Image (cartoon, helix red, strand yellow):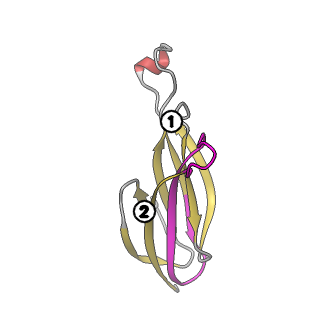
Amino acid sequence: MHGQRPCLLHGERGTVSSLKTGDTFQVSFSENPAIPLRWQVNASPGLAVINESYRVDLSIGDIFGMVGGSRGTKTWDMQVVQAGTWTLEMDQVRLNAAPGQSALVRTINVTIIATDR
């Protein structure tokens, strides 16, 4: 895919039907390192994570040290590696879950229908 990648953002659920094998796309979620919640991506075999990054969104409070943590954006660059119907599951998990407490906070699923080029 040439130019900017399609981006599936937090809260968007549904089907992406225009992708072909070899196409790339992004998944992005807000995250704050000061809060013990993290996003994890679980991809079906026809989808591959090719890069994972985190970008800090600085505010004036962050710059002057008035905030206890910097919010940012976690992004996964993904690629369709095989034609088919695939599920991309994004789980928000609690890092400090107590023993016996579920770490899973919520799950967002997106179905991707990929065709051969």
Q: Quadrant of residue 61?
A: top left
In the image, which is nearer the foreground, mark 1 or mark 2? 1
> Three-letter amino acid code at disc 1?
Asn
* Numbered disc 2: secondary structure: loop
106 in relation to 32, above or below: below
Q: Residue at x 53, y 46 (%)?
A: 74
Residue 99 in the magenta stretch? The answer is yes
Would you call the spot at circle 2 few (<14 residues within 10 Å), some (14-19), or many (20 or more)? some
Which numbered circle lies on residue 60? none
Image coordinates of residue 58 in percent, x first then y, are 46, 27
Spatial CA distance of label 1 from label 2 is 24 Å
Residue 6 in the magenta stretch? The answer is no
Would you call the spot at circle 1 few (<14 residues within 10 Å), some (14-19), or many (20 or more)? some
Range of the magenta residues?
77-103
2 horizontally vs 48: left or right:
left
Q: Quadrant of residue 97?
A: top right
Q: Residue at x 59, y 81 (%)?
A: 82
Sequence-wise first label, 1 or 2: 2
> Three-letter amino acid code at disc 2?
Pro
Which numbered circle lies on residue 6? 2
Q: Which residue is drawn at 51% across and 77% down?
A: 86
28 in relation to 81, above or below: above
Q: How many labels does the image show?
A: 2
Image coordinates of residue 100 in percent, x first then y, are 61, 50
Image coordinates of residue 89 in percent, x first then y, are 51, 65
Residue bearing mark 1:
32
Image coordinates of residue 88 in percent, x first then y, are 51, 68
53 in relation to 46, above or below: above
Foreground pick, 93 / 111: 93
Foreground pick, 39 / 112: 39
